[in-house]
Image (cartoon, grey):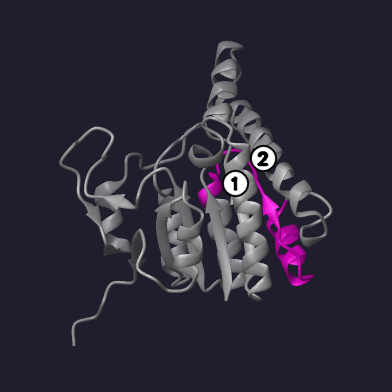
Amino acid sequence: MRVVLRIGGSVIASPINPALINAYVDLLKELKRLTHEVAVVVGGGALAREFIGVAKDLGLDERSQDEVAISVSRIFAQFFLQKLEELSCEAVPLTIEDAVNCLREGKIPVMGGLKPGMTTDTVAALIAEQLDADLFIKATDQEGIYNRDPRKHADAVKLERLCFEDLSRVFAESKHRAGIHQILDPEAVKLLKKGRVRVVVVNGFEPENILAAVKGEKVGTLIEQKRKLS
Protein backbone atom coordinates (compact mmCIF):
# COMPACT_ATOMS: atom_id res chain seq x y z
CA MET A 1 0.00 0.00 0.00
CA ARG A 2 1.16 3.53 -0.76
CA VAL A 3 0.53 5.79 2.23
CA VAL A 4 1.01 9.51 2.90
CA LEU A 5 1.23 10.27 6.61
CA ARG A 6 0.74 13.83 7.81
CA ILE A 7 1.89 14.19 11.42
CA GLY A 8 0.53 17.33 13.04
CA GLY A 9 2.90 19.62 14.89
CA SER A 10 0.25 19.67 17.61
CA VAL A 11 1.18 16.03 18.23
CA ILE A 12 4.98 15.91 18.24
CA ALA A 13 5.89 19.55 18.74
CA SER A 14 3.43 21.10 21.20
CA PRO A 15 5.45 20.65 23.36
CA ILE A 16 8.33 18.84 21.66
CA ASN A 17 7.98 15.12 22.41
CA PRO A 18 11.18 13.13 21.69
CA ALA A 19 9.65 9.87 22.97
CA LEU A 20 6.74 10.19 20.57
CA ILE A 21 9.06 11.04 17.67
CA ASN A 22 10.98 7.84 18.47
CA ALA A 23 7.70 5.91 18.52
CA TYR A 24 6.84 7.26 15.08
CA VAL A 25 10.26 6.29 13.77
CA ASP A 26 9.64 2.73 15.01
CA LEU A 27 6.21 2.80 13.34
CA LEU A 28 7.73 3.88 10.02
CA LYS A 29 10.28 1.10 10.25
CA GLU A 30 7.47 -1.38 10.86
CA LEU A 31 5.45 -0.11 7.90
CA LYS A 32 8.56 -0.43 5.76
CA ARG A 33 9.08 -3.98 7.03
CA LEU A 34 5.50 -4.75 6.00
CA THR A 35 6.45 -3.53 2.47
CA HIS A 36 4.27 -0.42 2.52
CA GLU A 37 5.52 2.69 0.73
CA VAL A 38 5.28 5.71 3.03
CA ALA A 39 5.85 9.44 2.59
CA VAL A 40 5.70 11.69 5.66
CA VAL A 41 5.01 15.40 6.16
CA VAL A 42 5.43 16.96 9.61
CA GLY A 43 4.34 20.30 11.02
CA GLY A 44 6.07 22.70 13.39
CA GLY A 45 3.26 23.04 15.94
CA ALA A 46 3.47 25.46 18.86
CA LEU A 47 7.15 26.13 18.25
CA ALA A 48 6.41 27.31 14.70
CA ARG A 49 3.60 29.53 16.00
CA GLU A 50 5.95 30.94 18.63
CA PHE A 51 8.44 31.92 15.94
CA ILE A 52 5.61 33.37 13.84
CA GLY A 53 4.82 35.56 16.85
CA VAL A 54 8.43 36.72 16.98
CA ALA A 55 8.31 37.50 13.27
CA LYS A 56 5.14 39.56 13.81
CA ASP A 57 6.75 41.46 16.66
CA LEU A 58 9.66 42.24 14.36
CA GLY A 59 7.22 43.71 11.87
CA LEU A 60 7.77 41.01 9.23
CA ASP A 61 5.03 40.37 6.69
CA GLU A 62 2.97 37.17 6.47
CA ARG A 63 5.18 35.65 3.79
CA SER A 64 8.20 36.03 6.07
CA GLN A 65 6.19 34.59 8.97
CA ASP A 66 5.37 31.57 6.80
CA GLU A 67 9.01 31.11 5.85
CA VAL A 68 10.00 31.00 9.52
CA ALA A 69 7.33 28.37 10.23
CA ILE A 70 8.51 26.31 7.26
CA SER A 71 12.06 26.34 8.63
CA VAL A 72 10.81 25.03 11.99
CA SER A 73 8.84 22.20 10.37
CA ARG A 74 11.94 21.17 8.43
CA ILE A 75 13.90 20.89 11.69
CA PHE A 76 11.41 18.28 12.89
CA ALA A 77 11.68 16.51 9.54
CA GLN A 78 15.45 16.48 10.08
CA PHE A 79 14.98 14.67 13.40
CA PHE A 80 13.07 11.92 11.61
CA LEU A 81 15.63 11.73 8.82
CA GLN A 82 18.51 11.32 11.27
CA LYS A 83 16.72 8.63 13.27
CA LEU A 84 15.67 6.67 10.17
CA GLU A 85 19.26 6.73 8.87
CA GLU A 86 19.60 4.71 5.66
CA LEU A 87 15.82 4.15 5.43
CA SER A 88 15.28 7.83 4.61
CA CYS A 89 16.65 10.35 2.13
CA GLU A 90 20.06 11.99 2.40
CA ALA A 91 18.38 15.35 3.05
CA VAL A 92 14.95 16.74 3.83
CA PRO A 93 13.10 17.03 0.48
CA LEU A 94 12.54 20.64 -0.52
CA THR A 95 10.18 19.93 -3.42
CA ILE A 96 7.39 17.47 -4.19
CA GLU A 97 9.61 16.00 -6.91
CA ASP A 98 12.41 15.40 -4.39
CA ALA A 99 9.99 13.53 -2.10
CA VAL A 100 8.58 11.42 -4.93
CA ASN A 101 12.06 10.52 -6.20
CA CYS A 102 13.13 9.57 -2.68
CA LEU A 103 10.18 7.19 -2.31
CA ARG A 104 10.78 5.67 -5.74
CA GLU A 105 14.32 4.89 -4.60
CA GLY A 106 12.81 2.75 -1.87
CA LYS A 107 13.31 5.31 0.90
CA ILE A 108 10.95 7.06 3.32
CA PRO A 109 10.80 10.79 2.49
CA VAL A 110 10.10 13.04 5.47
CA MET A 111 9.54 16.71 4.76
CA GLY A 112 8.15 19.85 6.36
CA GLY A 113 6.64 22.89 4.71
CA LEU A 114 7.24 23.80 1.09
CA LYS A 115 6.52 27.45 0.39
CA PRO A 116 4.70 30.46 1.89
CA GLY A 117 0.94 30.38 1.53
CA MET A 118 0.81 26.58 1.54
CA THR A 119 0.04 24.49 4.62
CA THR A 120 1.76 21.19 5.36
CA ASP A 121 -1.65 19.54 4.81
CA THR A 122 -1.55 20.78 1.22
CA VAL A 123 2.06 19.64 0.82
CA ALA A 124 1.00 16.15 1.92
CA ALA A 125 -2.02 16.21 -0.41
CA LEU A 126 0.19 17.18 -3.35
CA ILE A 127 2.48 14.25 -2.60
CA ALA A 128 -0.55 11.95 -2.40
CA GLU A 129 -1.67 13.25 -5.80
CA GLN A 130 1.75 12.72 -7.39
CA LEU A 131 2.13 9.24 -5.92
CA ASP A 132 -1.46 8.18 -6.62
CA ALA A 133 -1.59 7.22 -2.93
CA ASP A 134 -3.98 4.59 -1.61
CA LEU A 135 -4.36 6.19 1.78
CA PHE A 136 -3.84 9.62 3.41
CA ILE A 137 -3.60 9.60 7.21
CA LYS A 138 -3.74 12.76 9.30
CA ALA A 139 -2.35 12.24 12.81
CA THR A 140 -3.81 15.04 14.91
CA ASP A 141 -4.43 16.06 18.53
CA GLN A 142 -8.04 14.82 18.50
CA GLU A 143 -9.68 11.41 18.19
CA GLY A 144 -10.96 12.31 14.73
CA ILE A 145 -13.32 14.90 13.27
CA TYR A 146 -16.16 16.21 15.43
CA ASN A 147 -19.42 17.95 14.56
CA ARG A 148 -18.06 20.96 16.48
CA ASP A 149 -14.81 21.91 18.20
CA PRO A 150 -14.47 19.53 21.20
CA ARG A 151 -12.08 21.98 22.88
CA LYS A 152 -14.92 24.51 23.10
CA HIS A 153 -18.02 22.32 23.26
CA ALA A 154 -18.37 19.51 25.82
CA ASP A 155 -21.24 17.99 23.82
CA ALA A 156 -19.21 17.64 20.61
CA VAL A 157 -19.69 14.28 18.90
CA LYS A 158 -16.97 12.43 16.99
CA LEU A 159 -18.01 11.49 13.47
CA GLU A 160 -17.19 7.93 12.44
CA ARG A 161 -17.31 8.80 8.76
CA LEU A 162 -18.33 11.64 6.49
CA CYS A 163 -17.97 12.64 2.87
CA PHE A 164 -15.73 15.40 1.52
CA GLU A 165 -18.72 17.65 0.87
CA ASP A 166 -19.56 17.66 4.60
CA LEU A 167 -16.16 18.97 5.66
CA SER A 168 -16.99 22.61 4.98
CA ARG A 169 -19.35 22.49 7.98
CA VAL A 170 -16.50 21.71 10.37
CA PHE A 171 -13.82 24.03 8.97
CA ALA A 172 -12.53 26.62 11.41
CA GLU A 173 -10.80 28.55 8.62
CA SER A 174 -11.63 28.88 4.94
CA LYS A 175 -8.29 30.24 3.77
CA HIS A 176 -4.63 30.07 4.67
CA ARG A 177 -2.93 32.30 7.21
CA ALA A 178 0.42 31.92 8.95
CA GLY A 179 0.16 29.52 11.88
CA ILE A 180 -3.25 28.12 10.87
CA HIS A 181 -4.32 25.21 13.10
CA GLN A 182 -7.25 23.00 12.17
CA ILE A 183 -8.02 19.37 11.46
CA LEU A 184 -7.55 19.49 7.68
CA ASP A 185 -6.78 22.41 5.40
CA PRO A 186 -9.56 23.16 2.82
CA GLU A 187 -7.08 23.33 -0.07
CA ALA A 188 -5.77 19.87 0.82
CA VAL A 189 -9.34 18.56 0.91
CA LYS A 190 -9.91 19.76 -2.66
CA LEU A 191 -6.84 17.85 -3.86
CA LEU A 192 -7.71 14.70 -1.94
CA LYS A 193 -11.28 14.74 -3.19
CA LYS A 194 -10.14 15.24 -6.77
CA GLY A 195 -7.67 12.38 -6.46
CA ARG A 196 -10.29 10.16 -4.81
CA VAL A 197 -7.84 9.39 -2.00
CA ARG A 198 -9.12 7.52 1.05
CA VAL A 199 -8.54 9.73 4.10
CA VAL A 200 -8.47 8.79 7.79
CA VAL A 201 -8.04 11.30 10.62
CA VAL A 202 -6.76 9.73 13.85
CA ASN A 203 -5.43 10.53 17.31
CA GLY A 204 -1.73 10.97 16.64
CA PHE A 205 -0.67 10.60 20.27
CA GLU A 206 -1.16 6.86 19.76
CA PRO A 207 0.99 5.86 16.74
CA GLU A 208 -0.62 2.42 16.72
CA ASN A 209 -3.69 4.17 15.28
CA ILE A 210 -1.75 4.71 12.06
CA LEU A 211 -1.01 1.00 11.79
CA ALA A 212 -4.68 0.23 12.46
CA ALA A 213 -5.73 2.63 9.69
CA VAL A 214 -3.31 1.00 7.25
CA LYS A 215 -4.77 -2.41 8.16
CA GLY A 216 -8.25 -1.11 7.41
CA GLU A 217 -9.43 -1.28 11.01
CA LYS A 218 -12.08 1.08 12.34
CA VAL A 219 -10.24 4.02 13.87
CA GLY A 220 -10.65 7.81 13.94
CA THR A 221 -12.80 9.35 11.22
CA LEU A 222 -13.00 8.06 7.66
CA ILE A 223 -13.52 10.65 4.92
CA GLU A 224 -14.85 9.21 1.69
CA GLN A 225 -16.39 10.14 -1.63
CA LYS A 226 -20.10 10.97 -1.65
CA ARG A 227 -22.06 7.87 -2.41
CA LYS A 228 -24.21 7.94 -5.52
CA LEU A 229 -27.88 7.09 -5.19
CA SER A 230 -28.75 3.81 -6.87
Tell me the crowding category of disc 2: few under 14, some 14 to 19, or many 20 or more residues within 10 angstroms, Cα based.
many
Residue bounds of the magenta highlight: 95-121
Residue at the (18%, 37%) spot, across then down: 154
In the picture, which quadrant includes the C terminus?
bottom left
Labels in figure, total: 2
Mark 2 and mark 1 residues within 8 Å of each other at the beta carbon: yes
Residue 148, by quadrant, is top left
Residue 211 in sight here: yes
User: Is residue 139 located in the magenta-colored stretch of the structure?
Assistant: no
Front in this rendered view, residue 167 or 201: 201
Circle number at residue 76: 2
Q: Amino acid at mark 2?
A: Phe
Residue under label 1: 42
- Give the CA distance from mark 2 to mark 1: 7 Å
In the picture, which quadrant includes the N terminus?
bottom right
Q: Amino acid at mark 1?
A: Val
Q: Secondary structure at mark 2?
A: helix
Q: Give the percent coordinates (x, y) of residue 125.
A: 53, 59
Mark nearer the N terminus (2 vs 1): 1
Q: Give the percent coordinates (x, y) of residue 142.
A: 37, 45
Residue 218 falls left or right of residue 157: right
Residue at the (54%, 53%) spot, across then down: 6
Q: Give the percent coordinates (x, y) of residue 87.
A: 77, 61
Front in this rendered view, residue 28 or 76: 28
User: Is residue 104 located in the magenta-colored stretch of the structure?
Assistant: yes
Residue 168 falls left or right of residue 84: left
Residue at the (68%, 57%) spot, across then down: 96
227 vs 122: above or below: below
